[in-house]
Amino acid sequence: MLSFLPAPVIGVIASILLALNTLFWCLLLYIPGLLKLIVPHQGFRVLCTRTIIWISESWVACNTGWMRLTQNTKWEVEGADKLKRESWYMVLANHQSWVDIFAMQRVFNHRAPFLKFFLKQQLIWVPVIGPAWWFLDFPFMKRHSREYLIKHPEKRGEDLRSTRRACQKFRYTPVSVMNFAEGTRFTPEKHKSQKSPYQYLLPPKAGGVSFVLDAMGDAMEELVDVTIAYPAGAPTFKDFICGRVSSVKVHIDIVTIPEHLKGRDYASDAEHRRNVKEWIKSIWTEKDRKMARMMAE
């Protein structure tokens, strides 16, 4: 453990370890990624996908290694024993910090299928890791504003079509499709401006969840409800890399996805839209209660 060192020194060491770890595993991942792209055989591509996932899980495991070396964070995880390796999951979590992703990867690694989440299309150009996300079949989404869609109505439904194309690739190997339903990180300012009815959460958006339910609801039976709490306050990435996060709490619940919410068109079916929103709201109400307990303990 290097936690006795000054925070800036820890930050430098952790940053170097994170960079080297990411560079090594990403470059290794490019090999099966390019083979998957070149060889047009479905069985071979599935094998390449499994190899890519193994490499990605090794990256996460090494990240956990340098965290243990440089940090003295107390981790309290409840419910991870409910996860299964060979399942198709939809994963919902509250969002407070970039640290959430590292926390979830650490908790899910080798317990559940590798986490995949929707990314903005521009992120594919991020050096080194952008192509790695693409090889991992992360869905890249191009969001259009309401004003743009008014001018270009032919673009309506493009997000759903992109989701369906991405989800088709998920059918061959178990996957955990991740969604931060709040759509943005929680801050007191956003909480106030959005007039959130919750104490610790922003109002959830149901669109992303409904897209996945529409595209591959028949393959998914369970939703993994993840609640993340930082009793000392939501940390910045700098706090995290410098070892200043004293405690992380993660609570996991497995929720059965109602059959009547699967395979229906969220955009055109008003009743279905209302049902999905009510279901997500009920999950969020209970999540807020859990957050209150986790912050108080």
Image (cartoon, rainbow, N blue to C red):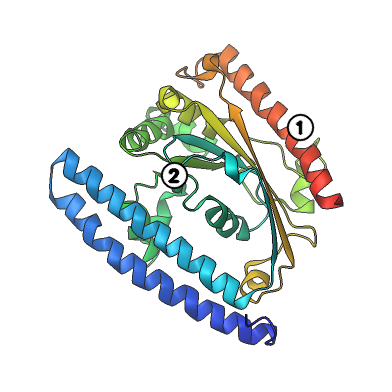
Instruction: Say whether residue 222 is left or right of residue 3.
Output: left
Question: Where the N terminus falls, by quadrant?
Answer: bottom right
The image shows residue 42 at horizontal and vertical percentages of 18, 39
The image shows residue 278 at horizontal and vertical percentages of 68, 22
Classed neighbour count for the residue bearing mark 2: other residues with Cα under 10 Å, few (<14), some (14–19), many (≥20): many
The image shows residue 27 at horizontal and vertical percentages of 30, 68
Distance (Cα) linking label 1 and label 2: 27 Å
Question: Identity of the amino acid at label 2?
Answer: Pro
Instruction: Say whether residue 199 is left or right of residue 141.
Output: right
- In this rendering, the answer to whether 279 lies above or below 166 is above
Quarter location, residue 73? bottom right
**Labels 1 and 2: the sequence-earlier one:** 2
Instruction: Say whether residue 7 is left or right of residue 290.
Output: left
Please give the residue where the numbered disc 1 appears in the rendered image.
285
- In this rendering, the answer to whether 63 lies above or below 114 is below
Question: Identity of the amino acid at label 1?
Answer: Thr
Which type of secondary structure does the marked residue at label 1 adopt?
helix
Task: Identify which residue, 280 or 232, lies in the foreground.
Answer: 232
Please give the residue where the numbered disc 2 appears in the rendered image.
113
> Residue at left 71%, top 37%?
203
Disc assigned to residue 78 = none
Q: Is residue 193 visible?
A: yes
Task: Identify which residue, 67 or 196, lies in the foreground.
Answer: 67
